[in-house]
Amino acid sequence: MSIRGTLGKLTVIGIALAILGITPAMLGPWEVQGQKRTTEVEQGLVRVLPANPVAPLATIASNPPAPLSPAAKQRLLQSVLTSLREQQKANPKLNVGKLFAISNTIPIPPAPGTLMLTPTQPYFGNNGGFVDRLTFFQADFVGSSPENRATWNGANGLLKLSITAVPGKTYLLDFSVKGGAPMYVALVGGVQYSHTVFNMEMNVTYGHILVPFVASDPHDGWDIYVSSHTSWTFYAVEIIRLN
């Protein structure tokens, strides 16, 4: 083809592009070695959409809290009991006396005399009857990897501890947790769950919350509910009978 013919065809193409409103700059580079040229018009067909919301993954917790030494546990118990008594004085309607009629100097027995429940060992006793057991309501994770733990992301769900308590005896519950500031604890006594009810807000101290109580209800079944308004992780609960 002659140079004059080629120029004529290019002029016709240029006039057609001008009528369509497409400039040479919009066309971009021509094909090189068989690669398809990309035009701004083609790129304009792509529209980025926001990602669909995805439920958060279970929080990967760090190492579980270290056990409290006997001396540290005794000091923390004294602090909890003192706080309960101060609140009773400030608000007599709380009526905590019977449920927490515990001496500040009551000794904590050594660990071999206690019972430990964890997410992978959540019950103790005869499965045919009432047992000490844990229930994990709406937990985001319950298992043993990377640690033996149960995790809740956000305010949904709670931990329920059901125990068989000897009426009149004193108990101490040592929950190992992380996160969840503060924690909310509800004590419900009586097999019909309509007798003793008490709610507490508790801070986490060195990865532990201590819940002392006297099984003042004549029935032996007690439920303890633990929850938080923020994400938190549960590792274990030690059930200690103090007398």
Image (cartoon, rainbow, N blue to C red):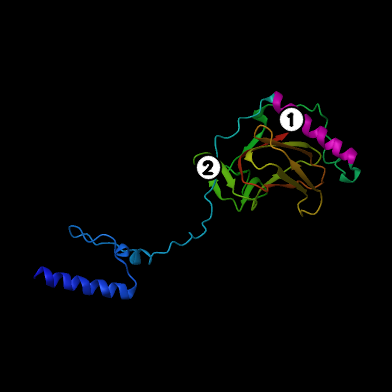
Figure quadrant of residue 173? top right
232 lies left or right of 243: left
179 lies left or right of 101: left
Look at the magenta stretch and give its main secondary structure: helix
Task: Report the quarter where the C terminus lies.
Answer: top right
Could you tell me residue 41's position as x and y percent?
34, 67
Please rate how many residues cluster around mark 2, counting C-alpha atoms within 10 Å: few if below 14, some from 14 to 19, many from 20.
few
Is residue 108 at least partly visible in the picture? no
> Disc 1 residue type?
Leu
Q: Which mark is residue 76?
A: 1
In the rendered view, would you say 16 is above or below 168?
Answer: below
The answer for how far apart the CA atoms under marks 2 and 1 are is 28 Å
* Labelled pair 2, 1 in contact (Cβ < 8 Å): no
Query: Along the line of sight, which residue is nearer the eye, 155 or 216?
Result: 155
Mark 2 residue element: loop
Task: Report the quarter where the N terminus lies.
Answer: bottom left
Where does label 2 land, which residue? 60
Could you tell me residue 51's position as x and y percent?
48, 59
Q: Earlier in the sequence, mark 2 or mark 1?
A: 2
Residue at image x 12%, y 71%?
4
In the rendered view, would you say 189 is above or below 39?
Answer: above
Figure quadrant of residue 105? top right
Instruction: Give the residues drawn in magenta, as a range.
Output: 71-90
> Disc 2 residue type?
Ile
206 part of magenta stretch: no
Please rate how many residues cluster around mark 1, counting C-alpha atoms within 10 Å: few if below 14, some from 14 to 19, many from 20.
some
Residue at image x 60%, y 30%?
66
Q: Nearer the viewer, mark 2 or mark 1?
A: 2
Query: Along the line of sight, which residue is nearer the eye, 213 or 33?
Result: 33
Residue at image x 64%, y 34%?
207
